[in-house]
Amino acid sequence: MRNTQRLDKLLSNHGYGTRKEIKQLIKRGIVKVDGEIVKDSGMHVDPMASTIEIDGEKLNYRKYVYIMLNKPQGVVSATYDNKYKTVVDLLPEEYKPFEPFPAGRLDIDTEGFLLMTNDGQLAHELLSPKKHVPKKYYALVEGMVTEDDKEKFREGIVLDDGYKTLPAQLEIIRAGAHSEVELVINEGKFHQVKRMFIAVGKKVKYLRRIEFGGLRLDESLKPGECRELTDDEVRILKER
Ligand code: URA
């Protein structure tokens, strides 16, 4: 199926400036379609079928973006907030025309892997309670986490509202007055990890999501940094 779009709109959506700025690029003769210098910024192109170049750089055409963000503390998982900085504010300008939104939520004080995308279908599926997409967290917990807690988490924990969680896999890295753990949950109830620990009399002091849907947070990303998923990573999410 042919999918033609106005060239100026397409380039603008891929971060090459406003339509007026695109017109200037075209005037300078640095935009080519299939090797031919473009004269008309309103020309229609099929970005799947044609090669588009801007100053010798090939357009990386995509309809959807999939971004792994290492969410820092102090920002909210929303597209707009009248008080706090949002995860969208953290993204480089080039992604803004795609209108990515967070696929799910991390609390304001939680760090780690947040998927940002404009693929509504995929986001919907990953967040569906029926899908049981696994999420792995690293947590620093006040109190001694025990083998008994591990067993309780494996059986499912009854939260403060009476909901019993699905079985969760708790791994104790270090147990003491403060404990370090890793926890895999297969659902995403509000404040779930914190509430699970409260149910066993402990308090989460620090929380970081280190895996989402089988993908690991890229360790080279500092809090606040992001990168696009590779095609293989997108495939892994879609095949869930
Ligand atoms: N569980 C929580 O309690 N908070 C988060 O941000 C994510 C999972």
Image (spheres, helix red, strand yellow):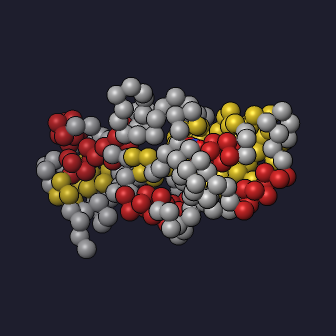
Q: Is there any visible trace of residue 56 in the rendered image?
A: no
Q: Is there any visible trace of residue 112 in the rendered image?
A: yes
Ligand 1's image quarter is: top right
Instruction: From the top left corner, tell me how far across and down residue 203 is, in percent.
Output: 69, 36
Of residues 188 and 228, the one nearer the viewer is 188
**Compared to 98, does 133 lie above or below?**
below
Instruction: From the top left corner, tell me how far across and down residue 195 is, in percent.
Output: 62, 45
Quadrant holding the C terminus: bottom right
User: In which quarter of the view is residue 92 placed?
Assistant: top left
| Residue, far top | 83
User: In which quarter of the view is residue 125 placed?
Assistant: bottom left
Quadrant holding the N terminus: bottom left
Of residues 77 and 159, the one nearer the viewer is 159
Residue drawn at 19 percent across, 40 percent down: 19
Residue 86 appears left or right of 217: left
Residue drawn at 33 percent across, 47 percent down: 98
Residue drawn at 79 percent across, 58 percent down: 151
Instruction: From the top left corner, tell me how far across and down residue 70 is, in percent.
Output: 56, 40
Of residues 8 and 150, the one nearer the viewer is 150
Instruction: From the top left corner, tell me how far across and down residue 60 is, in percent.
Output: 39, 52
Residue 106 appears left or right of 145: left
Residue 228 appears left or right of 217: left
Of residues 233 and 18, the one nearer the viewer is 233
Tally of numbered discs: 0
